[in-house]
Amino acid sequence: MIIMPDADMDQAVDALLGAGYGSAGERCMAISVAVCVGDATADALVAQLKPMVQALRIGPGCQGDPDMGPLVTGAHRDKVRGYVDEGVAEGATLVVDGRGLEVAGAEKGFFLGGCLFDHVTATMKIYREEIFGPVVCVVRAPDFDAALTLVNGHEYGNGTAIFTRDGDAARQFAHQVQVGMVGINVPIPVPMAFHSFGGWKRSLFGPLHMHGPDGVRFYTRLKTVTARWPTGVRAQAEFTMPTMK
């Protein structure tokens, strides 16, 4: 998710909070990286996002109305926690640390608090690999071109988004980004089922996407019939590819 300097920051923060920590980050379309164009943009995003991540309500889904539930297994919780450890070791700034979370009455649950990193670089493991947990990384880019290069240079290309008030920047992003699903001021660009769903690069296995026309093709076995009904005039043998002449 790219955040331009002219973006509505309130809208961008709300979108990132839901898209990054919804379902505890355990969904294919979760936003795990926010690329801020300019340090001032990043500073404003982190300052506004930090208290909201700290205030996330975390607990069992059957009790109260939590924002986030547990992770799927204890092993996966430990794996995500390991990514946070590695991010700290690699030099990223851990703005919000959710590793020590304990939920009263559910001490044996697989809970992990929301984590927020700043000053993440493209060489770090927490940027290169999909964490699949409640961890958001903030990357700082000097300009739009550098931000776009980051997105296009990644081996995965499932979904991306840009937040901006500039229609020219949005149009350029949509045309040049090498990702299968693109949102403009939309954090999770998942269209209706009559559109195809799926990414590019290593985010796609096989030749077809899901839903939409590709979904029909997936469940359809193609049959090609080539026929000609002669008019009764016998033609000579042909040694080239047949045509409808």
Image: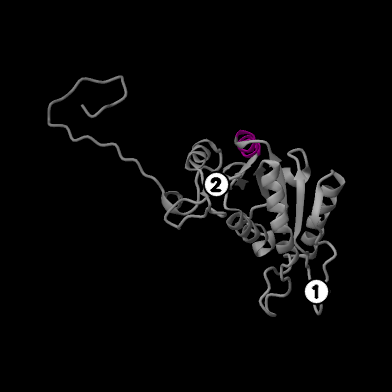
Q: Quadrant of residue 156?
A: top right
What is the number of callouts on the image?
2
Q: 202 above or below 188?
A: above
Specify start and end residues of the magenta stretch as a single range: 145-154
Neighbour class for label 2 at 10 Å: few (<14), some, many (≥20)? many
Residue 12 as seen in the image, left or right of residue 244 = right
- Helix, strand or loop for the magenta stretch, by majority: helix
Residue 23, x across and y down, in percent: 65, 64
Under tag 1, what secondary structure? loop
Q: Which residue is mark 2?
A: 164
Say which amino acid is labelled 1. Answer: Val
Q: CA distance from mark 1 to mark 2?
A: 38 Å
Q: 5 above or below 72?
A: above
Q: Which residue is mark 1?
A: 103
Residue 225 as seen in the image, left or right of residue 63 = left
Q: 202 above or below 80?
A: above
Q: Quadrant of residue 115?
A: bottom right
Neighbour class for label 1 at 10 Å: few (<14), some, many (≥20)? some
Residue 72, x across and y down, in percent: 72, 65
Residue 113 in magenta? no
Please report whichever mark, 1 or 2, sits nearer to the chain's N-terminal start. 1
| Residue closest to the eye, 88 or 5 | 5
| Residue closest to the eye, 238 or 17 | 17
| Residue closest to the eye, 76 or 208 | 76
